[in-house]
């Protein structure tokens, strides 16, 4: 599939490396210029300059407005054929789901809601439809061929692992010999393992997951610090396993769910920059600094001529009640967003990516999940009687994220913003 080739095309993005201003030479006879008055030439030059200046002003105004509204840059110039695929709605589709978790050896039992006793199946029958364009149905055979010889890497928390499992299960439906697909170290899928890699032997590619919930290093605090400090996040240093992410063709990041007081301060984890503790630093400020460290690493270490980089935004949860401990699922998607969207995190991600020199595509999935209060694990996990209104059932919402990734990779208009402020 020519359009599905992961190699970068000249129409994929605009950058200083491949943007050419050269063109055919135009030969104009001197007599033409001689017949024009100086006044005519000056007037034409003034009009052209004015039009260009006005265009620049309008462009900068639109871009700055988009940043202040928390809109990602590619929503203005990087859309697929003029369409933002993340603006849309869920529509019923009886041909879904795309796979069966019970027959996919790489789907965790904890995400397989049907195997854990869920009886209703309507939550499986929804497809994401962009408002202004059509995303073709997932073609597993074309996708497998496009990934031949590639390395796909997911980095993040358990939400990233869920997407990784979905990615693999979707691809498994096109594999004739299931035993030719295996975990490279023979490990069982587990949330406690920092690295998991699945190799598709017949197609010579791997799909890997690295557990890095904060993206930056977590370690012991400096000596002589307060006793309540058990560990620190070193906001100026990326995770020590980051060197293993570099040599890849597709990199998909996420972070955000662990950036809350319960996961940090309540467990004795605080922030550190250099050798100094930052005990009073707000979580949002720390997250922004961590994102800037990540951005610097991408620009320094990743060959973006080879690697397509995605950053997925925050996935909403649907906890309710006074203490946010009640998990009440609906039977179908709701008409208005009800999930916790942590919009301040989305804004930070958007702002940091907009300032980067390297091309990064934001997977703006926050609004997609905000209406899917029907699709969480709820009481159908593997750790009963615990309920879960954060993670998603598989098959389910993460499949739509992957469908959009496959579409963006295959489409010659893949958004790869290179705007500079």
Image (spheres, rainbow, N blue to C red):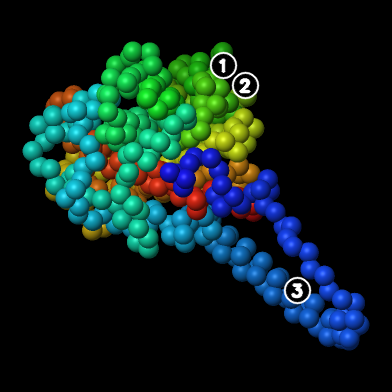
Looking at the picture, tell me which residue is in the foreground, 353 or 266: 353
**Would residue 280 be seen by someone viewing this image from the given angle?**
no
Task: Identify the secondary structure beneath mark 3.
Answer: helix
Look at mark 3 in the image and give the residue it sits on. Answer: 49
- Asked if residue 63 is positioned above or below residue 411 in the image, the reply reads below
Please report contact status of discs 2 and 3: CB closer than 8 Å, yes or no. Answer: no
Q: Which of label 2 and label 3 is nearer to you?
A: 3
Q: Which of label 1 and label 3 is nearer to you?
A: 3
- Disc assigned to residue 275: 2
Looking at the picture, tell me which residue is in the foreground, 221 or 245: 245
**Would residue 8 be seen by someone viewing this image from the given angle?**
yes
Mark 2 and mark 3 lie on one chain; the one further toward the N terminus is: 3
Look at mark 1 in the image and give the residue it sits on. Answer: 222
Q: Position of residue 112 (x, y in %)?
A: 19, 31
Q: Position of residue 254 (x, y in %)?
A: 43, 36
- Disc assigned to residue 154: none
Q: Position of residue 78 (x, y in %)?
A: 52, 55
> At x 73% / y 60%, what residue is drawn?
23
Task: Identify the secondary structure beneath mark 2.
Answer: loop
Distance of label 2 from label 3 (alpha carbons): 53 Å
Distance of label 1 from label 3 (alpha carbons): 59 Å
Task: Identify the secondary structure beneath mark 1.
Answer: loop
- Asked if residue 46 is positioned above or below residue 361 in the image, the reply reads below
Distance of label 2 from label 1 (alpha carbons): 7 Å
Please report contact status of discs 2 and 1: CB closer than 8 Å, yes or no. Answer: yes
> At x 62% / y 30%, what residue is drawn?
301
Looking at the picture, tell me which residue is in the foreground, 274 or 23: 23
104 relative position to 32: left or right: left
- Badge 3 local density, few (<14 within 10 Å), some, or many (20+)? few
Mark 1 and mark 3 lie on one chain; the one further toward the N terminus is: 3
């Amino acid at each position: 599939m020519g359009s599905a080739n992961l190699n970068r095309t000249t129409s994929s993005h605009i950058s200083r490396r491949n943007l050419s201003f050269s063109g055919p030479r135009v030969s104009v006879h001197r007599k033409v210029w001689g017949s024009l008055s100086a006044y005519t030439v000056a007037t034409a030059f003034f009009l052209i300059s004015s039009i260009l200046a006005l265009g620049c002003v309008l462009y900068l105004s639109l871009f700055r407005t988009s940043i202040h509204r928390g809109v990602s840059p590619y929503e203005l110039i990087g859309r697929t054929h003029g369409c933002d695929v993340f603006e849309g709605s869920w529509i019923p589709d009886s041909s879904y789901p795309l796979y069966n978790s019970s027959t996919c050896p790489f789907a965790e039992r904890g995400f397989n809601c049907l195997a854990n006793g869920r009886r209703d199946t309507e939550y499986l029958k929804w497809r994401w439809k962009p408002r202004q364009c059509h995303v073709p149905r997932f073609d597993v055979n074309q996708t497998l061929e496009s990934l031949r010889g590639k390395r796909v890497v997911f980095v993040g928390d358990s939400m990233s692992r869920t997407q990784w499992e979905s990615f693999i299960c979707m691809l498994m439906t096109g594999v004739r010999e299931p035993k030719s697909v295996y975990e490279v170290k023979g490990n069982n899928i587990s949330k406690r393992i920092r690295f998991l890699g699945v190799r598709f032997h017949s197609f010579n590619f791997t799909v890997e997951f690295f557990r890095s919930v904060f993206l930056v290093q977590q370690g012991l605090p400096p000596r002589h610090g307060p006793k309540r400090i058990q560990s620190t996040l070193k906001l100026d240093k990326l995770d020590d396993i980051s060197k293993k992410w570099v040599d890849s063709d597709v990199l998909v990041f996420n972070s955000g769910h662990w950036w809350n007081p319960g996961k940090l301060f309540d467990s004795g984890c605080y922030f550190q920059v250099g050798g100094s503790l930052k005990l009073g630093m707000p979580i949002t400020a720390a997250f922004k600094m961590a994102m800037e460290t990540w951005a610097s690493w991408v620009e320094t270490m990743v060959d973006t001529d080879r690697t397509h980089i995605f950053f997925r935004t925050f996935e909403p949860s649907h906890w309710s009640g006074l203490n946010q401990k009640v998990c009440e699922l609906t039977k179908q998607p709701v008409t208005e967003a009800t999930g916790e969207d942590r919009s301040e995190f989305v804004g930070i991600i958007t702002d940091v990516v907009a300032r980067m020199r390297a091309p990064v595509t934001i997977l703006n999935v926050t609004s997609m999940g905000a209406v899917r209060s029907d699709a969480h694990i709820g009481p159908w996990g593997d750790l009963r009687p615990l309920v879960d209104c954060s993670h998603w059932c598989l098959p389910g919402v993460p499949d739509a994220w992957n469908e959009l990734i496959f579409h963006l990779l295959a489409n010659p208009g893949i958004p790869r913003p290179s705007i500079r402020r």
